[in-house]
């Protein structure tokens, strides 16, 4: 999964471009008081589109997911917590401990009614763009990586390494690099690590180990 190919200039249909333009305008209103978050979201969208073109993923869906992935960041943490409880989001721990994971999950539940043109794959990518999951689709991986390496992010060694791997390694490996880097960042900062992240890590690590063993056999 996620074989590399030469990225070509992406051309969207008039209908697709119109929807993307509508979403950009909606996001500008939604994040009017958070210009840096708006700039980040649009940068993620462009980065996701390029990654998608490189790895054979639908660039329109990647761009759309990038635009909308931080929609709920317009809300304060307390507002996100309240909305998550209203929606019945249950991660098995106190939501205050994992508040940084909630915005994508909230958006994935509330935005489909606003943008019915977009398929479930977009909402799943948005839901897991910070938490990841054991079964990541190529679109999920593209959004996850784009969020971490978009050019407005600081040039840390880990981010620069991930950027340098684009187009040189399979998408699965690029995602793994970004995912593990995120865990390292949490641990080095002494932050709470969501137990679900450990489960995802172990599932992915076991799968990678099994694949490596088959390749050596």
Image (spheres, rainbow, N blue to C red):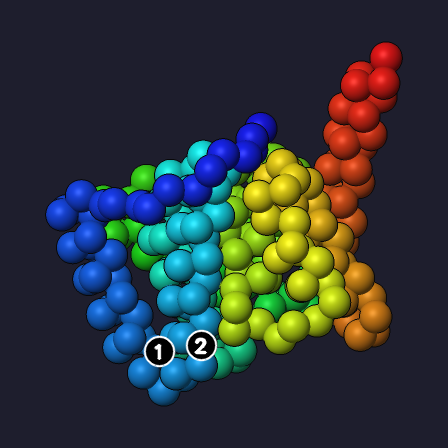
Q: Residue furthest bottom?
A: 33
> Number of numbered discs present?
2
Which residue appears at 52% of the width and 79% of the height?
A: 78
Q: Position of residue 107 (x, y in %)?
A: 41, 59
Q: Are marks 2 and 1 in contact (CB under 8 Å)?
A: yes
Which residue appears at 65% of the width and 55% of the height?
A: 164
Label 2 and label 1: CA atoms lie apart by: 7 Å
Q: Is residue 188 above or below residue 180?
A: below
**Residue tagged by mark 2?**
37
Which residue appears at 74% of the width and 67% of the height?
A: 157
Dot 1 lies on which element?
loop
Q: Position of residue 101 (x, y in %)?
A: 59, 62
Q: Is residue 87 visible?
A: no
- Left or right: residue 120 compared with residue 159: left
Q: Position of residue 123 (x, y in %)?
A: 41, 48
> The C terminus is located in which quarter?
top right
- Mark 2 and mark 1 lie on one chain; the one further toward the N terminus is 1
Dot 1, how many residues are within 10 Å of its Cα: few (below 14), some (14-19), or many (20+)? many
């Amino acid at each position: 999964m996620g074989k590399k190919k030469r990225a070509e200039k992406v051309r969207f249909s008039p209908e697709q471009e119109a929807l993307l333009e509508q979403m950009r305008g909606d996001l500008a209103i939604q994040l009017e008081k958070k210009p840096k978050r708006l700039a980040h979201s649009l940068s993620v969208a462009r980065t996701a589109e390029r990654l998608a073109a490189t790895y054979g993923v639908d660039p329109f869906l990647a761009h759309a997911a990038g635009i909308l992935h931080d929609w709920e960041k317009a809300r304060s943490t307390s507002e996100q917590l309240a909305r998550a409880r209203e929606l019945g989001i249950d991660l098995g721990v106190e939501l205050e401990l994992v508040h940084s994971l909630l915005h994508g999950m909230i958006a994935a539940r509330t935005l489909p009614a606003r943008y019915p043109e977009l398929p479930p794959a977009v909402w799943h990518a948005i839901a897991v763009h910070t938490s990841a999951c054991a079964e990541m689709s190529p679109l999920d991986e593209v959004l996850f990586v784009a969020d971490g390496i978009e050019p407005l992010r600081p040039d840390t060694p880990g981010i620069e390494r991930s950027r340098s791997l684009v187009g040189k390694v399979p998408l699965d490996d690029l995602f793994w690099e970004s995912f593990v880097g995120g865990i390292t960042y949490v641990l080095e900062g002494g932050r709470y690590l969501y137990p679900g992240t450990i489960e995802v890590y172990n599932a992915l690590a076991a799968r990678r180990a099994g694949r490596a063993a088959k390749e050596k056999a």
